Amino acid sequence: MKILIAADMEGISGVADRSFVLEDGLNYELGRFLMESDVNAAIDGAIASGATEILVVDGHDGGHNLRITNLNSRAVLLTGSARPFPMITGYEEADAAIFIGYHAQFGTSLALLDHTYTSRLKLWINNVEAGESYMNALLCGSKNVPVILYSGDQALAEEVRSFSPDSFQVVVKEAYGRSAAGSLNPQKSGFLIKENVKKALKAWQDGHIKPVTTTDPVEIKVQFIVSEMAEQAAVLPGAEQIDPLTVVSIQPNIELGVRAFLAMIALAKAPLF
Ligand SMILES: [Zn+2]
């Protein structure tokens, strides 16, 4: 049984604002420790349930937050920003996936550091408003890989329930604003993650958790916060700017749809004013 553990940082227990997730932040080293703690708990749960191969992907920023020396030696750690899908590299070969430290989509209220790759846009996939959890779950689903558990704040859990009610959501903190959270102690959240990973793996093996899918072709709609960004994103071949802020790209499948989305982000530079 091969398990992918995809880790982000904003939804890690104890992470309460930018100072934990930016390299030069006051609490960054603590943030790394907390991220390792939540990820190790997921590894422990997977091993206890019989996982034979565990790939951990460091999906936050440049992908160099987790320190291999601090992770359970049974896991392989993928660091660095492999392309084209750096948050879930290796998903095609997993039997099931676990998303640790995830966060709500941009524009969610009372959600810690809510964003969708950036905090400059909203995304819809086939007219469903999407964040990173839904987008990455769809990529996994396209290869028949279910995401069985997500950890993060209460807003992430609510978002996940809307598209994957049969998955497990572990709430490790409650957001009191975009930069304030009341969090469980990492020992407590680690216990919850480990126990729920075991339950989720059993539920999946019993046939209760299905992959998340959408229909082909896939319409990617991106609404930027500044018209200049939409104009730049519309340079993407085949993309159409349908109003001052919004660009649409229709692609044959979700993989190409996400590539189109990532290309739009690369093209669109947020102006200073
Ligand atoms: Zn992140």
Image: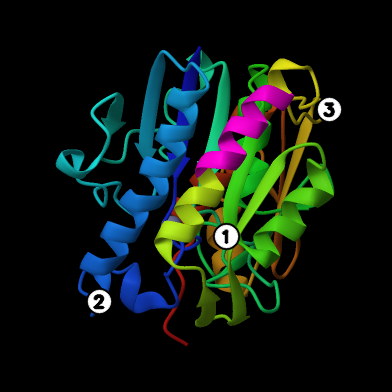
Q: For the residues labelled 3 and 2, say whether their Cβ atoms are less than 8 Å apart.
A: no
Query: In the figure, 222 relative to 270: above or below?
Result: above
Q: Mark 2 is on which residue type? A: Gly
Horizontal arrangement in the rendering, residue 217 relative to residue 72 (left or right): right
* Quadrant housing residue 241: bottom right
Residue 201 covered by magenta stretch = yes
* Quadrant housing residue 27: bottom left
Residue bearing mark 1: 103
Q: Which comes before the other along the chain, label 1 or label 3?
A: 1
Dot label at residue 25: 2
> In terms of secondary structure, where does tag 1 sit?
loop
Pick whichever, 48 or 27, lies toward us. 48
Query: In the figure, 176 relative to 58: above or below?
Result: below
Horizontal arrangement in the rendering, residue 147 relative to residue 100 (left or right): right
Residue bearing mark 3: 215
Dot 3 alpha-carbon crowd within 10 angstroms: few under 14, some 14 to 19, many 20 or more? few
> What secondary structure characterizes most of the magenta part?
helix
Q: Position of residue 233 (x, y in %)?
A: 56, 55
Q: Mark 3 is on which residue type? A: Thr
Q: Position of residue 248 (x, y in %)?
A: 73, 49
Instruction: Write the residue at 56% across / 80% down.
Output: 178
* Quadrant housing residue 76: top left
Q: Which comes before the other along the chain, label 1 or label 2?
A: 2
Q: Is mark 1 within 8 Å of ligand 1?
A: yes
Q: Position of residue 129 (x, y in %)?
A: 77, 55
The residue segment tinted magenta is 194-203
